Image: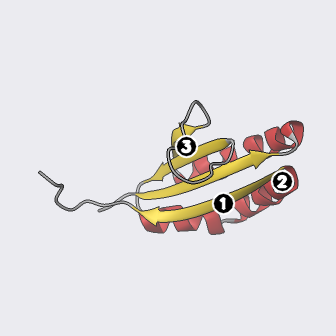
């Protein structure tokens, strides 16, 4: 079964308030088994315009990734994020099919 992913791009406008979001989102991510693959760090925007932070979170499957987002725990955290940042978030299903080569 293909994994599910959150792919987020974030500009933080209030770092202190954003830390409250980070603390709050940990509850939902622990409950749904979210695992950070990318969490800030260096990057190079080779095409298009990037935001200051790039984040990729892996879940056991797409349904779990959606359930985490829809959960009461994450919705409470999301309210904190909205006050402290501007972002885009995509939830996508991974790919388990054949690879080139």
Q: Would you name the residue on which mark 2 appears?
A: 80
The image quadrant that residue 15 belongs to is top right
Asked if one can make out residue 13 in the rendered structure from this viewpoint, the answer is yes
Front position among marks 3 and 2:
3
Residue contact between numbered discs 3 and 2, judged by CB atoms under 8 Å: no
Q: Residues within 10 Å of mark 3 (few under 14, many from 20)?
A: few
Of marks 1 and 3, which one's residue comes earlier in the chain?
A: 3
Q: Would you name the residue on which mark 3 appears?
A: 45
Front position among marks 1 and 2:
1
Which secondary structure, mark 2? helix
Front position among marks 1 and 3:
3
Q: How is the image coloured?
A: secondary structure
Rounded to the nearest whole Å, what is the CA distance between mark 1 and mark 3? 16 Å
Q: Nearer the viewer, residue 75 or 56?
A: 56
Judged from this view, the residue extending furthest toward the front is 47
Residue at point 55% right, 35% down?
Answer: 43
**Residue 30 image offset from top left, x and y in percent:** 59, 46
Q: Residues within 10 Å of mark 1 (few under 14, many from 20)?
A: few
Which secondary structure, mark 1? strand
Of marks 3 and 2, which one's residue comes earlier in the chain?
A: 3
Rounded to the nearest whole Å, what is the CA distance between mark 3 and mark 2? 27 Å
Q: Would you name the residue on which mark 1 appears?
A: 88
Residue at point 52% right, 39% down?
Answer: 38
Residue at point 54% right, 55% down?
Answer: 7
């Amino acid at each position: 079964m293909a994994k599910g992913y959150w792919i987020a791009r974030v500009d933080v406008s209030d770092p202190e308030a954003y830390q409250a979001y980070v603390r709050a989102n940990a509850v939902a991510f622990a409950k749904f088994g979210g695992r950070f693959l990318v969490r800030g760090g260096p990057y190079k925007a080779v095409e298009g315009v990037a935001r200051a932070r790039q984040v990729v979170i892996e879940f056991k499957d797409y349904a779990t990734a959606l359930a985490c987002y829809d959960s009461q725990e994450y919705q409470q955290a999301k309210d904190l994020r909205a006050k402290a940042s501007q972002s885009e978030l995509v939830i996508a299903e991974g790919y388990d099919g054949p690879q080139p080569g």
